[in-house]
């Protein structure tokens, strides 16, 4: 099957399942501590009930962590696992390493990260952090206001419902992007609509 055939399959499935939209992107965060922790903690967890309330709590408890500099200052004196009420040394370590990487690259604010993550070499740098895969890199972009397709298990499952299987991450991302363009949808908005559809079915 050609890539264009997959695009047509996915576009038809989107129309049948989700309608014509519009699909609004969630918008992300302006608080860099929340951005970093969202990216670090969200995988394979129920977002609405487990992750989002903890991120809101973190913002309230650590208002000075709205920049990478402020977040790292908090990390030096406070326990992130306690602040997030989430006992996962691996995820805590990922948050520390992302913060260190961004600080080393002079990325401090949401606006800085929005621009920085748009460059291929910087996306590759993020991938060097243990726990950060291609989906997380795209997801980080969406958290700071970019509009990208972050392929996760929900988006793969939705594509499989349209008989689209066996594609690599980049191939499936390209199919979703092309379907979004064909249907006139914002990519991040479409991704979020698919994610909501599949996550609510669990």
Image (spheres, rainbow, N blue to C red):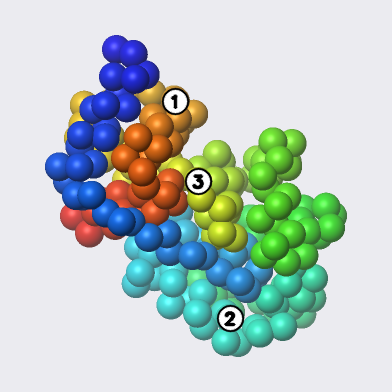
- Residue at screen point 53% across, 55% down: 142
Helix, strand or loop status at disc 3: loop
Mark 2 vs mark 1: in front: 1
Label ID, residue 60: none
Label ID, residue 148: 3
* Label 2 – label 3 distance at C-alpha: 24 Å
Viewer-nearest residue: 141 or 11? 11
* Label 3 – label 1 distance at C-alpha: 14 Å
For label 1, the residue is 171
Q: Position of residue 15 (x, y in %)?
A: 20, 42
Mark 3 vs mark 1: in front: 3
Viewer-nearest residue: 103 or 144? 144
Q: Quadrant of the N terminus?
A: top left
Viewer-nearest residue: 48 or 106? 106
- Residue at screen point 50% across, 71% down: 86
Name the side, left or right, on which 42 lies relative to 47: right
Q: Position of residue 112 (x, y in %)?
A: 74, 59
- Near mark 1 (Cα within 10 A), the count class, few <14, some 14-19 or many ≥20, is few
Mark 2 vs mark 3: in front: 3
Helix, strand or loop status at disc 2: helix
Q: Are the two marked residues, 2 and 3, in contact with CB atoms closer than 8 angstroms?
A: no
Q: Quadrant of residue 76?
A: bottom right
Residue 96, visible in the rendered structure: no
Q: Are the two marked residues, 2 and 1, in contact with CB atoms closer than 8 angstroms?
A: no
For label 2, the residue is 59
Query: In terms of sequence position, does the residue under pointer 2 or pointer 1 come before the other?
Result: 2
Total numbered labels placed on residues in the image: 3
Residue 188, visible in the rendered structure: yes
Q: Quadrant of residue 192?
A: bottom left
Name the side, left or right, on which 97 lies relative to 3: right
């Amino acid at each position: 099957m050609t890539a264009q055939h997959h695009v047509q399959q996915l576009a038809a499935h989107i129309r049948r399942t989700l309608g014509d939209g519009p699909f609004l992107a969630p918008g992300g965060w302006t608080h860099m501590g929340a951005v970093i922790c969202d990216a670090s903690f969200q995988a394979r967890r129920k977002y609405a009930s487990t992750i989002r309330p903890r991120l809101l709590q973190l913002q309230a408890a650590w208002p000075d962590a709205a920049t990478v500099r402020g977040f790292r200052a908090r990390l030096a004196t406070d326990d992130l696992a306690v602040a997030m009420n989430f006992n996962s040394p691996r995820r805590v370590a990922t948050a520390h390493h992302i913060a260190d990487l961004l600080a080393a690259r002079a990325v401090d604010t949401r606006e800085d990260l929005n621009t920085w993550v748009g460059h291929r070499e910087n996306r590759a740098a993020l991938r060097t952090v243990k726990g950060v895969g291609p989906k997380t890199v795209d997801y980080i972009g969406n958290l700071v206001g970019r509009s990208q397709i972050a392929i996760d298990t929900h988006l793969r499952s939705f594509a499989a419902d349209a008989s689209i299987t066996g594609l690599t991450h980049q191939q499936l991302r390209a199919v979703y992007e092309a379907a979004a363009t064909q249907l006139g949808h914002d990519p991040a908005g479409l991704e979020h609509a698919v994610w909501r559809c599949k996550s609510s079915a669990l």
